[in-house]
Image (cartoon, helix red, strand yellow):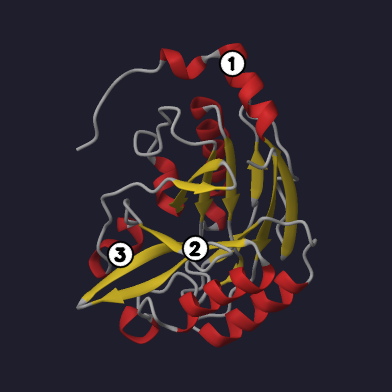
Amino acid sequence: MEDILNIALIQANLLWENTQGNLNYFDTKIERISSDINVVILPEMFSTGFSMNPENTSETMEGISVTWMKETAIKKQLAVVGSLIIKERDTYYNRLVFAHPNGEIHTYDKRHLFTYGGEDKVYSSGNERLIVDYKGWKICPMICYDLRFPVWSRNSDEYDILIFVANWPKPRISAWDTLLKARAIENMCYTIGVNRVGVDGNNLEYIGHSQAVDMLGEEMTPNSIEDEAVLEVALNKSKLCENRNRFRFLNDKDSFSIE
């Protein structure tokens, strides 16, 4: 078990529906991160931007982007996390991939599709939550709109870190800031949000605010950076356990089931 887990959050200005260009961009960024980084987190649909054109932008799990994630994880000996557009048979998914340093991968299909943006019209929803065991840490990765649904992310002492990768636009950025803190506090966990910046092919503007929040809702990184940035943060397992054992908030949670 690693008591300290070092995370890099890459807040990127994604190139619209330009997979190779985005992979080249992230190669450059990852080459510059600290040598002790254990996990690199990319935004939602990191290879294309938030595209509703899966016919032209989707890949298979054997495609260029997943292959790049696995090869990068192996080469740099760290985990790479991000979502992209995946096609399986005749169905499209907004799928998060967690690539381990040994080449193993875990996946999560976005549960809550953004109906306001028409995501539900072209993508299929997932129905299983993912908990990844990595270096003795339990990690629960989710995607953008999932952030608005606290029941889906409710912690029953199953995980230590909650991750949200996103394309969360400027007009609703205050909700992003508020909900990341809320998820951290109510679930007594580290919560990390990685958003993009720039303007996409639909002329939507994004201003980042990628950030890490601890189990008490305290900011661990600057939370209002609006340009391209790589934020590095160290998560402390002993501090997490100490606060959970002291306050024991999770012991008083309500019991319920999700359908």
For image coordinates 55% across by 65% down, the residue present is 102
Instruction: Specify the quadrant that holds the C terminus.
Output: top left
Residue closest to the eye, 219 or 234: 234
According to the image, label 1 marks what residue? Answer: 245
For image coordinates 58% across by 34% down, the residue present is 181
Q: CA distance from mark 1 to mark 2?
A: 34 Å
Instruction: Specify the quadrant that holds the N terminus.
Output: top right
Q: Position of residue 249 (x, y in %)?
A: 50, 16
Q: CA distance from mark 2 to mark 3?
A: 16 Å
Lateral position of residue 28 relative to residue 82, left or right: right
Q: Position of residue 255 (x, y in %)?
A: 30, 20
Q: CA distance from mark 1 to mark 3?
A: 43 Å
Residue closest to the eye, 49 or 174: 49
Q: Position of residue 104 (x, y in %)?
A: 47, 65
Eye-nearest disc, 1 or 3:
1
For image coordinates 56% across by 41% down, the residue present is 137
Dot 1, how many residues are within 10 Å of its Cα: few (below 14), some (14-19), or many (20+)? few
Q: Secondary structure at mark 3?
A: loop
Residue closest to the eye, 135 or 148: 135
Q: Secondary structure at mark 1?
A: helix
Of mark 2 and mark 3, the one earlier in the sequence is: 2
For image coordinates 52% across by 83% down, the residue present is 19
Marks 3 and 1: in contact by CB < 8 Å? Answer: no
In the picture, residue 89 is in which quadrant? Answer: bottom left
Dot 2, how many residues are within 10 Å of its Cα: few (below 14), some (14-19), or many (20+)? many
According to the image, label 2 marks what residue? Answer: 44
Inspect the image, locate mark 2, and give the three-letter code of the amino acid beneath it.
Glu
According to the image, label 3 marks what residue? Answer: 118
